[in-house]
Amino acid sequence: MTQTTSGRPARGGRRRDESRDGVILDAALDVLVETGFDGMTVDAVAARARAGKATMYRRWPSKVDLVLDAVARMESGDVDLDHLPDTGSLRGDITGLMRAETLEDGGRRLRVLASLAAMTAREPRLGAAADEVGFGTWERANRVLIERALDRGEFPREHVDVDVLSRLVPQLCAARACVQQQPITREFLLSVLDGVLLPALRGSGPTG
């Protein structure tokens, strides 16, 4: 008899259709955003994805397991740190990350973050997932781009706190999406870039 990775004997029956996992995990994120974690049920996700409930529970024994896999799927399509824009200027590099599909994904991930926020203290695994879904990769990308700009002498390195500045744009995006309930647009990101981040790096007030 074959066994699962946990050591339990595998149940008989048809092999699971892994091609359906993406549909189910996307449905899980949609339900999570609509209902919050407490209101979310595996049954509701199964209905949204038109998946069998028995199959769902075999694959994800709890909704925590389901949400963790859904968040991991979201992270897998994030910014590629190995292929960041390199235009010769920090403004050009960050602007190069502002693709329409990226902005839409960013708004969705922040709505997911808001849905997980109340659960982070009660479920440590969800807390760790929330840290990542809240633009964790964007912060790392910004850190790389800012360090690159400092290395080429675009800004004075003295008194620059790279860690703080790399989190600046993601945190303002989080406030806009989660607190103000406003979309993250290219215009908003450019206003933060030109009015806050670049002046902070130059050590001056907002640019004209």
Image (cartoon, rainbow, N blue to C red):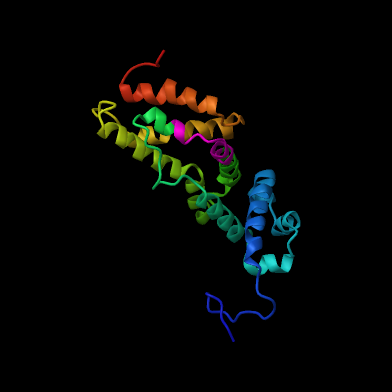
Q: Is residue 61 visible?
A: no
Image spot of residue 79 (x, y percent): 46, 44
Image spot of residue 165 (x, y percent): 37, 32
- Which residue ends up furthest to the bottom in the rendered image? 1
- Which residue ends up furthest to the left in the rendered image? 158
Q: Could you tell me which residue is drawn at 49 percent across and 30 percent down? A: 172
Q: Could you tell me which residue is drawn at 56 percent across and 56 percent down? A: 68
Would you place residue 101 above or below residue 89 in this image? below
> Quadrant where the C terminus lies?
top left
Residue 20: quarter of image: bottom right
Q: Could you tell me which residue is drawn at 66 percent across and 56 percent down? A: 23
Would you place residue 103 above or below residue 35 in this image? above
Residue 106: quarter of image: top right
* 146 magenta-colored: no
The span shown in magenta is 95-106
Would you place residue 117 above or below residue 149 in this image? below
Residue situated in front as seen by the camera: 14 or 134: 14
Image spot of residue 35 (x, y percent): 69, 46
Prevailing SS of the magenta stretch:
helix
> Quadrant where the N terminus lies?
bottom right
Residue 16: quarter of image: bottom right
